[in-house]
Amino acid sequence: MKGRPDFYWKKSKEDGYPARSVYKLQEIQEKFRLIQKGNRVLDLGSSPGSWSLYILDLLSGSGGVTGVDLNLPEKTLLSRRGFRFIQGDFFLPEILARISDTGPYDIVVSDAAPSTSGNRTSDTARSLELARQVLRICRSSLAAGGNTAVKIFQGGEEREILEEMKSHWKSARAFKPRASRRDSMEIYFVGCGFIPQ
């Protein structure tokens, strides 16, 4: 955890979520209504599992979540009905094949971030490449009309990601949740209504 425990960190422990990031997705959901009951959701960079847990709660036993991450999520998530986990790097062909086999998805979300080095130029470039890969996966595995939310670090060429999304979704915009730390360079790009090419 970066920085001192704050309101959202404490709230996540009280609410039973492994990370404060859950409240970022909650704000995105309240504003954009990306996720509906019965949806099939792909969660890229899913561990430790807060986003997947929140989505499963929203789905209330309908639909399902496929999580993908290098690291295993919390055991409580692995035992949840409706959750499937793929361990590995979603840049690798074999992992992409497994993602494709379990699709198509109604929603693709990604809170994935690179391990930060402290070099802003390097960190934003790596975040940009992560976001590009998420969009590649969307183009191959997201159903027509589907929605997405992807995290990206500001300070590089992130506007080109948003412009690309505007050509593939009916609407696409940037959103900074209140739950993001004030000094964080993260922002989320939200696309609604995927248009397959």
Image (tube, grey):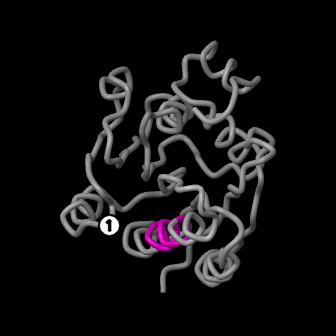
Secondary structure character of the magenta stretch overall:
helix
From the top left corner, tell me how far across and down residue 136 is, in percent: 43, 75
Q: Is residue 145 left or right of residue 62?
A: right
- Residue type, label 1: Phe
Image point 44% across, 66% down: which residue? 142
Q: Is residue 49 left or right of residue 111?
A: left
Most foreground residue, 66 or 130: 130
The magenta stretch spans residue 129: yes
Q: Secondary structure at mark 1?
A: loop
Image point 56% across, 63% down: which residue? 123
Q: Does any portion of residue 182 appear in the rendered image?
A: yes
Q: Residue furthest top?
A: 14
Above-or-below relation of 171 to 9: below
From the top left corner, tell me how far across and down residue 21 is, in percent: 61, 37
Most foreground residue, 35 or 127: 127
The magenta stretch spans residue 35: no
Image quadrant of residue 119? bottom right
Q: Is residue 97 left or right of residue 118?
A: left
Image point 31% across, 36% down: which residue? 72
Image quadrant of residue 158? bottom right
* Residue corresponding to mark 1: 91
Image point 30% across, 57% down: which residue? 89
Instruction: Please tell me how crowded label 1 is: few (under 14), some (14-19), or many (20+) other residues with Cα within 10 Å.
Output: few
The quarter of the rendered structure image containing the N terminus is top right
Q: Is residue 194 left or right of residue 82?
A: right
Image quadrant of residue 82? top left
From the top left corner, tell me how far across and down residue 99 is, in percent: 29, 59
Above-or-below relation of 5 to 64: above
Magenta-highlighted residues: 127-135
From the top left corner, tell me how far across and down residue 81 is, in percent: 34, 27
